[in-house]
Image: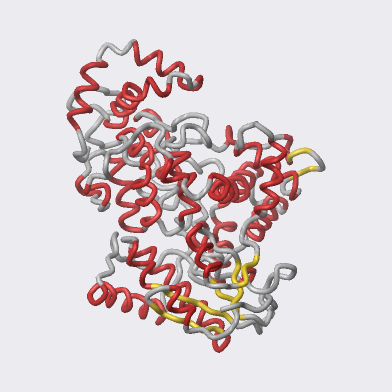
Amino acid sequence: MARARTSVGTRRWLFGDQLGPHFLGSAQAPGDDGTQPVLLVVSRAAFRRRRYHRAKAQLVLSAIHHRAAELGDRAQLIVADTYRDAVASVDEPLSVVDPTSWAARRLVRGLGADVLPSRGFVSSEAEFGEWVAQRGRRRLLQEDFYRWARTRTGVLMDGDEPEGGRWNFDADNRLPPPKGATTLGLPHPWQPTEDDIDARVRDDMRRWETEDGIEFGGRAGPRLFAATRAEALAALDDFVAHRLAEFGPYEDAALTGDWAMAHSLLSAPLNLGLLHPMEVIDRVVAAFRDGPAPLASAEGFVRQVMGWRDYVWHLYWHFGEDYVKDSNALDAHTPLPPWFDRLDADAVEARCLSSSLADVRDRAWNHHILRLMVLGNWALQRGYDPQATTEWFTRNYVDAYPWVMAANVVGMALYADGGRMATKPYAAGGAYINRMTDCCKGCAYRPGDRVGARACPFTAGYWWFLDRQAPLLKGNHRLAQPLASLTRLADRAALVEQEDARGDTAP
């Protein structure tokens, strides 16, 4: 049916990742005026399509139900088999902020909703298009995008120059974990207290499993991430007060006894739309201006939110709907082995891989280095199918959506797009993991061994990957040195035979 022209009185259809006040109101005046009616939909079919981690499903459903409770009589919450079924039962015009996936955008247009421009990011799609046009034939490098975003917004800028005279403080933000430490010694991160809504959501999920054949992965546990705006603001306060100062130096480090380290844990509420990225950035910059947070930590955080989050969002649309499906530059077709697919961390002896899988199994989260340099690195070395790997990340992480994981997995972790995004594959051996984590202590393998009973599967896998992909990678100047070293390995043949024999068995 035809939809009326958008106004603040039109019922706003909010998707489950559009739950903050900035998704209400008009395009000219976003925000909640306290009167706009809202439609919220829970689609069982959306959970039937993927075997989502139960912690992820719990968080999303809790957030939707909490938002409905907050809005009271203004909200119409419909639990239906499909979005189409739900919208068909609503006999009034609907407006919607443009959703975050290709499929959802087709859906809202097909159902006749009045579509407003997307929200929840620092830069708009139109602004990104202007930046792309300015680039001409030059690569769309993240560093250049980040500098453009800083200049455009004035964040951490001193006139036309970056604050402190440097655009990034990566050199200061790559410290390994403190020697001999088991944790960073920071206060435990803020954690929500579950309520009756969470209990009802858990009951719904159990009923779906027994009656509707919907399957969830991972382990059940307490909800760790914010599901309401009030909770998200509390998590932001906690991060700024207790972990921001240490975030920069240790953002790439990992300790098996400290799952959160100094990370903000704000990616989940940001991607649910509970926080606007600029309000988070403003808080972090204020903490630097007021003195508690060093510039290196503030800049590192701004880079992650304004530089990286916006960048992968825009690349999702720029690369097109078939980017994941059509990207397999390294001809990787290995199916995910059952132990990896089902998060069977106990089947794995390699301590870094076992610990990272256990993080995902138990919490549906770990930080970016474990995602990229352990799990993604393993999938790259082993030639896991890019579509299957992207799907695995999408359904198993609380902060993951198709727009998040397309460029992160296909472009960054797997180099499956042949270099459209990253300038080289992020393959690494055990030496990197040994330097940046405590995983190699007490491991059954030795990071310096390539061949033999204690050969590190990441070190051996690194050279096995280069051996297998040398013809496709020989033109990449950033790999010239390791490819030259490959030709000089005295144990190359034995290494290849060893790794070929490993197959899909858990290391």
In this picture, residue 189 sits left or right of residue 2: left
Name the residue located 31 percent from the left edge and 78 percent from the top edge.
Answer: 203
In this picture, residue 453 sits left or right of residue 305: left
Name the residue located 78 percent from the left edge and 38 percent from the top edge.
Answer: 161
Find residue 160 and report its image quarter: top right
> Residue 503's spot in the image, x, y percent?
20, 34
> Residue 156's spot in the image, x, y percent?
72, 46
| Residue most extreme to the right | 159
Identify the colour scheme used. Answer: secondary structure
Image position of 477 with respect to 187: above or below: above
**Quadrant location of the N terminus?**
bottom right
> Does residue 45 appear in the picture of this structure?
yes
> Residue 421's spot in the image, x, y percent?
53, 37
Q: Nearer the viewer, residue 496 or 124?
A: 124
Find residue 54 and report its image quarter: bottom left
Image position of 85 with respect to 47: above or below: below
Name the residue located 65 percent from the left edge and 63 percent from the top edge.
Answer: 117
> Residue 385's spot in the image, x, y percent?
33, 41
